[in-house]
Image (cartoon, coloured by chain):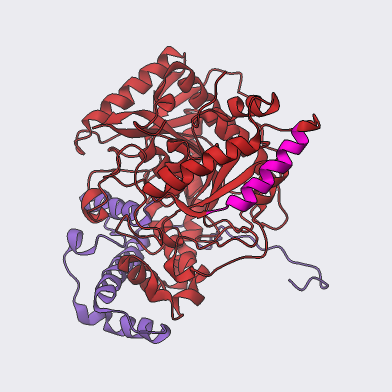
Amino acid sequence: MPEKVSRRQFARTLSLGAAAVVAPGLVGAAQGQEKTEQFETALAEIDAQLHEKLSDEARKIAQENLAGSRRVAKGRLAVKLPENSEPCTLFFASSKDKTR
Amino acid sequence: MNISPFSTIEQLHRAIRSKKISSEELTKSYLLRLKTIGARHRAVAELTEDLALRQARIADERIAKNERVGKLHGIPYGAKDLLATKGIPTRWGSPGHSDQVFDYDATVVERLRDAGAVLAAKLSMIELAGGGNYNWAHASANGACLCAWDKSRWAGGSSSGSGAAAALGLVGFTLGSETSGSITCPSAFNGATGFRPTYGRVSRFGAMALCWTLDKIGPICRSAECCAAVLQAISGHDARDASSVLGPLNLSAPKKKLRIGLLPEAFDENQAVACKKAYQDAVEVFRKLDYEIVEVKYPDLPYWMAISIIVDAEGASAHEHFIRGPRFKELADVSQVGGFASALDVKAVDYLWALRFRTEALRANEVWTKCDCVFSPVFYHAAPPIDRPFSETFANMGGDLGPANLLGWPAMAFPIGFEDGAPLGGQIIAPALEERICLKVVRDFQRETDYHLLTPLGTA
């Protein structure tokens, strides 16, 4: 499925009132534009991890996604989870002779 | 009975078993369709002609010896190109993985080989299953895969070729995969029937990982019955996949009267006139079939926020080596480059929140006290045009924003009508491990209607 599409749709839906959250992909449309400068550090860190710096177009998209992710990160705080609740992950302890 | 490229698995099985057609003849006829119609729709990533003919001849030898064979024996199929196939390119739809070849088969490919099925083609897909937030239909090494019914429209994604090939009668059945809609979307857009099983029902060993905690593999076929036959063959525990469930698959129809839940829908807000009519007609069919119809709601939780974070974090981790490497820039859609790159920035606390939220989201299981399954449209509109970005064309599409994928619930997508000549899909969503409910409801619907039997013009 178009992951982006669903997330965009999700964000659009939420921007209509359900919660103050915008997912990646619907950045400028729902909540106004972020200042470019606040993502310069993050983009520089991302560029440093890549073999080649992002093109201008990819960089613009990455910046929009970063803005969306920041909003999600902020918005998730509105969802109260039980204190100390465990993440839904599994790890089975293995015997000492199992190496992988 | 005469068989056609659109015959069901049962019909093809009977024809092969009774020697009305050999597997080799059937395979050659499907190979021809893959080379012609499949190429025109960009549904094929790699033709596996030599392997297919070898496997078909082996299948025929067993038939000649009157050996006992299963339903899939000798039937050609296509596999989404994210499934590892020994010695055959597996490019994950990505231009940056053009020379990737594995030396082993995915578990599902092994299981289908053991069932006597014939691998005829690897089918096209959105690059890296679209995990980087694609915005164009051409986000694939194969270009935009075209809708089976209208070549000016998209075939859906990320299992694009699987949906198109099933609907175009290019093979007997196909395999797709879904992280979040990648089976239901192309099924709906092509008028095919697709079965997303419960998370863990089918082994993911040998499948490209996008999200370890969301990925599922399932069939896309031409009917619910066909999907059941394939799911039966590919499901079952596999020690090589830590998420693999232990219990057996039970597809026997539940005896009790089933309640179908209807969610609040937004047809009018999305100008979904045709979809509203198709949906209401489908509900009437269910009533006529003596299903009880009830209105339901999921708990109001931001399921998609969690999915969004999980897709970013797990997708970036699964493909980190590639993202950091020299071929990353080769991805066909620049949105994917920007998306995967920005996902490197996801914080651990955000990801762990999403995994903790998933436990909280289990509250959504409350819905199953009011109904046995949920019916909803896959999208509010038919497939969008290929020449415009999704940021424009999906504005009024809707889509499943509920808990189903996050909680690993099964769903079966199936055709329920048309909009401007292109198919509309509905879906039956059931509780985890209750695939048999999806199967019963859709099978009953398909016995009463003929949407799944209609074929695109000019492809017979």
Residue extent of the magenta highlight:
B47-63
Task: From the image, give the main secondary structure of the stretch colored magenta.
Answer: helix
Residue A37 shown in magenta: no
- Whether residue A45 is visible to the viewer of this picture, yes or no, is yes
Whether residue B212 sits left or right of residue A78 in the image: it is: right
* Residue B270, quarter of the rendered image: top left
Estimate the x, y position of residue B193 in percent, counting from the top left: 47, 34
Q: What's the residue at 64%, 62% (across, down)?
A: B87
Estimate the x, y position of residue B330 in percent, counting from the top left: 38, 72
- Chain identifier for the purple-coloured part of the image: A
**Quadrant in which the C terminus of chain A appears:** bottom right
Of B363 and B233, nearer the camera is B233
Q: What's the residue at 31%, 26% (across, down)?
A: B278
Q: What's the residue at 47%, 65% (across, down)?
A: B315
- Chain identifier for the red-coloured part of the image: B
Relative height, residue A97 to residue B309 (above, below): below
Estimate the x, y position of residue B203 in percent, counting from the top left: 64, 51
Estimate the x, y position of residue B416 in percent, counting from the top left: 37, 27
Q: What's the residue at 36%, 84% (across, down)?
A: A47
